[in-house]
Amino acid sequence: MVDRIFRESIKGIGERLFNNPFTRTNRDGVRYRPTRMRLPSWVDRDTMTEGVDGFSSSIDINVERVDEARPLSILRNSPMFPNVSKEFRTGNLLQEFKDRSPSDGVEIVDWMHISASEAAVMSGWESEYNENSQVNTTSGDPTAPHDIIGVSDFNFEPTPGRDVASSGSATFRTPDQTVEIANNSGKAVYGKDNVGWGGVDARPGSYQWNGKVAQFLDLGQTPIENPVRFPDFGKYTIPNIFNQSPPSSSDQATVSFAISSEAGQDMDIAFRDPNDYTNPVAQNTVSVPEGTSELEFNVTANPEVPPLLAEVKPTEAGSVQSIEAYTVESQ
Amino acid sequence: MKYNIQTKVDGIDSSMMRVPEWSGTVQNLMPASSGTIPDNITDIADDTNRIRGISVASESSEFNPSGLMGSGIYDEPLSTDPSKLMSWARETTPVEEEPDVTDWMVPAKAYVATLKARSNEYKRAGSSLSVAAGDPFTPGVSNSQMGFKSERGQTISENGSGTVIAGGNEFDVPINGNTEIVTPNMLGWAAATDIQDKQWVGSLMSVEDITLDPSQPIAFPSISGQTGPLFVGHSQSRPSLISRVSVGVQSSQKQTLQFKFRNSSDYTTVMNSFSKDVPKGKSTLSFRMISLSLEPMAAEIMPEDGTQAVLTDYSVRP
């Protein structure tokens, strides 16, 4: 395994370590922004190589319900739609957008309400996630006008919606590959140094369809204190992906976070190699009850627990609202 | 690698600029490091920056730019002409045939293709430019660094402006007009056009990673009579009080270009500026900059609205 530690300095501030550069050129000569993890100052080559190789793949997760489900009021407003209700489920905003701007067949048509609902939820998620990091999202119609270019490096082919519905999938372009994403589903796509997500909803007979895209630019770094929602599209959700970064060098660390859910739900928790995101390191599935639950588990590695990409995802849509208080304590 | 600024300041994602390793430490490197040469741009009064010898040499009177890129989304014409792009969008967008396609999607498609092409050209120059276009009311428009507030076309018509939000800060964008969006750490541009009762088209462009020494064509964004700026890093390869600058430009008509040189530690601080006429066709604009600060700057080049222009190169010596 080869480590990748990039040293950068900021004028007047000093040196910082990252696992990827700010921009990189792909094999076609196209410049893109990798997904970056800021690395703690104590990491060295051994941490990033032997530490990742030696990471404990058996994770025993303790779950304890501590409170009722958190109210929607803890979520942040969308900056674009500040007067729209706080929500993590796009379907619950649909009527609000229909009431706000009814379809008239001239300026407003139905797919715009769906895209606006998705934009409101995703831009609210951005606000929560982007406290000290950066995820970039967009939603719209990938055919025409293709108003989903707000995310630079992940995109859909401009295929008419009826063709997506009949073929069963849409083509999603990333900095280094194209992948098919099934209709009425979402998929997190991991490249070696980049992470994006695409969601597809096309209807038979319609020219337009609803595409949504997220590009993780700077992974949110632990500790993450404020609640961060799971954008929920009715049949699928966007996972939350963080930089699980131990504060100091140690061969054992305790990881904890809280999940708020309106119903019992299984959660997938997976870790990936910071040197190559296509390389899964460990994963587990845990059940959380209705309410707010604290999850805690220990991780070990030799010589020391490395920073890892951590993905937390509800296995089904509809109930899991948010994650908060994600911390790592070195033991 | 050394950068001028943190990736995020006050909640706004930065327009990063790669700076030389000596940036911020010039005092230690200069032969005359006796304390007479300050090492921080903020120590320098803005009026110490001088620009001399501005000249323009015409090379060709034809405006026929080559080397432009496409959006990579569609097979649209490779052109800087907004009317050509609009005709293409009108021909390829089935407004009459498809019930879920409406009028605003035609200009939006043209602007999406135009702005994405400019983004691709900027990327080719080793950097990163984020763009977006669409209807800000419903479904909304945002890019990686900012977004339009969702307002009806009628509302912004009455107010005279739409609103761009970046990191909790709001910026007015005049209707049927455009404006720079510049904060201490971000360089951007926005336009509000094609205003109907509810729908309108908002266009956004912002720099994620500012280009240095571009040597291949980058067209200035031009949509519906609105022409936007390009931002280019102005950085010397070694510390020198005098730098010689060469700017290659192609213009669709005789026009006045505005240059601003922004402090790379705070883009809202303009260190110097000038305007210069360039003829139709291809020309090279040259000037000398004399500056005690020695620090890199962000050069902003702004053509006149309604014109088409292409930056072919921007070089700073040493």
Image (spheres, coloured by chain):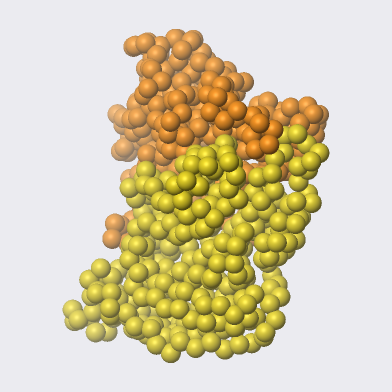
Relative to residue B106, is residue A310 depicted above or below?
A: above
Q: Nearer the viewer, residue A26 or A50?
A: A26
Q: Whole-percent x and y of residue A324?
A: 38, 26
Task: Count how many numbered circles sit on residues in the image.
Answer: 0
Which quadrant holds the N terminus of chain B? bottom left
Q: Is residue A20 visible?
A: yes
Relative to residue B90, is residue A72 depicted above or below?
A: above
Which quadrant holds the C terminus of chain B? bottom left
Identity of the residue furthest to the front in this view:
B158
Using the rendered view, name the quadrant where residue B114 is placed. Answer: bottom right
Q: Whole-percent x and y of residue B127?
A: 53, 61
Q: Whole-percent x and y of residue A197?
A: 59, 36
Q: Nearer the viewer, residue A234 or A260?
A: A234
Relative to residue B14, is residue B281 depicted above or below?
A: below
Q: Nearer the viewer, residue B186 or A304?
A: B186
Q: Is residue A47 visible?
A: no
Q: Whole-percent x and y of residue B160?
A: 46, 51
Using the rendered view, name the quadrant where residue A90 is placed. Answer: top right
Q: Is residue A50 left or right of residue B109?
A: left
Q: Is residue B317 left or right of residue B102?
A: left
| Chain in yellow (letter) | B
Seen at 69% across and 73% down, the residue is B65
Seen at 39% across and 30% down, the residue is A76
Seen at 55% across and 67% down, the residue is B305
| Chain in orange (letter) | A
Seen at 69% across and 44% down, the residue is B103
